[in-house]
Image: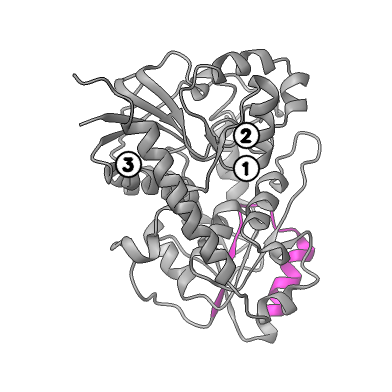
Amino acid sequence: MKKVGIMSMQRVANYGSFLQAYALKQIIEELGCSVEFVDYHVGKTLIEEKKSILGQKVHKALNYLIGDGRFIDRINFINHKRLFIKNYGDYLGISDVENFNPILDVLLIGSDEVFNCIQSNPNVGFSLELFGANNKAKRLISYAASFGNTTIEKLMKYKVDEEVKKNLNNFDYLSVRDKNSISIVKTLINKTPSYHIDPVLLYDYMKDCKKIPDKVDEENYIILYAYPGRINKEENEIIKAYAKAHNKKIICFGGVQKCCDKFIDCSPFEVLSYFKNADGIITDTFHGTIFSIINNKKFITLVRKSQGSSYGNEEKLTDLLTRLKLDKRIQYDLRNLDKLLSENIDYSDTNDIIKVERSKAKAYLADSIMKGWKSE
């Protein structure tokens, strides 16, 4: 039995990071491998944010506490973040004890934004371990890895392009999930990586995962899935007006917003059930978009452009939706909210594309993990 380690964003306390990690674990176990998650040592951030004398975690909690939305929802959100790994880490086989540099047959880096090294997040920083440095595996591969909003220009600006290039050359197999990442790899090492879908699209959650309940306790609702502070005043007002006009409750996941009627703290599997039963979804996140797609729901995706050192999502969201022939869901404001959440979406082409991509991705994982070993 091959021993496979996954180095991902498995300790990030949000539903997308969890569900992509769980999905990849399930697919690899189906190959007959044992799977464990591998941690990385956090590096120094290349983009500096203003320091808080309170510490980053306390500063964030205070921002959540004084933010928009009902006070009880803000408290529930803080507890949701605080207890996320404790409540759901067992599904991934992770605990408070971190797993650094284990001896493995294969180290797989991905999915999620594991290559997004030009960012201010102090929980990630610039860590070459996310590019395979210092690993103790016989084979190094990636699956649907992403540079996020790190671009080749940013790598050069911060003078880390040569270090990244050196480490990318050590991979036995390279797979990314977006065209920005393909472009970076081609520019740095003159190789074209494989182009694969995110694990939440790869694993057929709605058919194969028995942990997802059929029904939820709410009805007649729309979902707003966005992180705290990302829905501005005007957007909140438009969403509130839409919900009132259509007699819908606004349920929030991912963060509490001003227009939120109720923030729900539930398991990652229950979230997918809420998406399945929703009357519409508004999101500005990558995985919120995917949760909508795998349930074939009416949705709108707000795309955010990077400005200065701020975090944008344009590269990954436009790539995802264009690739799946859902370009009309790409919106930079909410002026068309009523129209877009009222019209039916023809998912026939999208579902056909996902079916083909699942087959390609599973073949890649079987080849990169299982093939070519000498008999022992």
Label 1 vs label 2: CA separation?
8 Å
Pinpoint residue 273: horizontal percent, then vertical percent: 41, 68
Pinpoint residue 141: horizontal percent, then vertical percent: 44, 28
Q: Mark 1: which amino acid?
A: Asp
Tell whether position 239 is magenta: yes
Q: Are marks 1 and 2 in contact (CB under 8 Å)?
A: yes
Left or right, 112 with respect to 151, comes to left
Give above or below for 222 relative to 1.
below
Label 2 vs label 3: CA separation?
23 Å
Left or right, 36 with respect to 280, comes to left
Closer to us: 251 or 178: 178
Q: Is residue 246 visible?
A: yes
Q: Which residue is mark 1?
A: 178
* Quarter of the image where the N terminus is located: top left
* Badge 1 or badge 2: first in the primary sequence: 2
Give above or below for 104 relative to 287.
above
* Badge 2 or badge 3: first in the primary sequence: 3
Closer to us: 151 or 117: 151
Q: Mark 2: which amino acid?
A: Phe
| Magenta highlight range | 221-242
**Label number found at residue 147:** 2
Secondary structure beneath disc 1? loop
Quadrant hosting residue 96: top left
**Label number found at residue 91:** none
* Badge 1 or badge 3: first in the primary sequence: 3
